[in-house]
Image: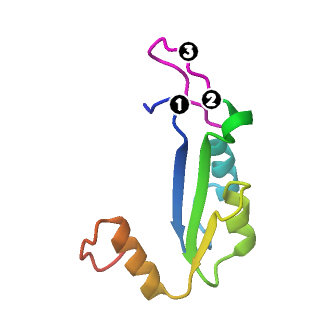
Amino acid sequence: MESRPEAKKAVIVVTDGKSNIGPPPVRVARELLSLRWEDTDGSDVVWDADKYGPQVEIYAFSIADANTVELESIVSRLPAHVFRLSTFSLFADFARSLHGGLSIRSF
């Protein structure tokens, strides 16, 4: 994956908050949080975690009755990284907004 090594990365998880397939979400989240982008153009850019914090931050958007423990286990250990929407209708509106307002009926 190519990306500017000096830029902070954001991962946005949109979920119903109830994992049921694949590897445990916390394992995948820890792998993502451990990623570091290295200089590939000779500029010697190194991410300064002490100055800027983690290079990758994970945010989660979920429905209100989501598994809070699971959500908290996958997001970055910083404030304001879990957001809850109260209904599936609001969730669908949110998903549409991420897709530029496309009128796709299901997400």
Q: CA distance from mark 1 to mark 3?
A: 10 Å
Q: Is 38 in the magenta?
A: yes
Residue projecting furthest to the top: 42
Q: Residue at x 66, y 58 (%)?
A: 75
Q: Find the residue positioned furthest to the left.
A: 103
Residue 30 x/y as whole percent: 69, 47
Which amino acid type corresponds to the residue marked 1 in the rendered image? Glu
In which quarter of the view is residue 26 placed? bottom right
For the residues labelled 1 and 2, the Cα–Cα distance comes to: 6 Å
Residue 98 drawn above or below residue 48: below
Residue 63: percent from the left, percent from the top? 56, 80
Identified by mark 2, the residue type is Trp
Residue on which disc 2 sits = 47
Looking at the rendering, the stretch of residues picked out in magenta corresponds to 34-47
Category of crowding for the residue at label 3, using alpha-carbon neighbours closer than 10 angstroms: few (below 14), some (14–19), many (at least 20) = few
The residue where tag 3 is placed is 44
Q: Quadrant of the N terminus?
A: top left
Q: Amino acid at mark 3?
A: Asp
Which residue corresponds to mark 1? Answer: 6
Q: Residues within 10 Å of mark 2 (few under 14, many from 20)?
A: some
Q: Is residue 49 magenta?
A: no
How far from the left and from the top, in percent, is residue 55? 61, 39
Residues at discs 1 and 2 in contact (Cβ within 8 Å): yes
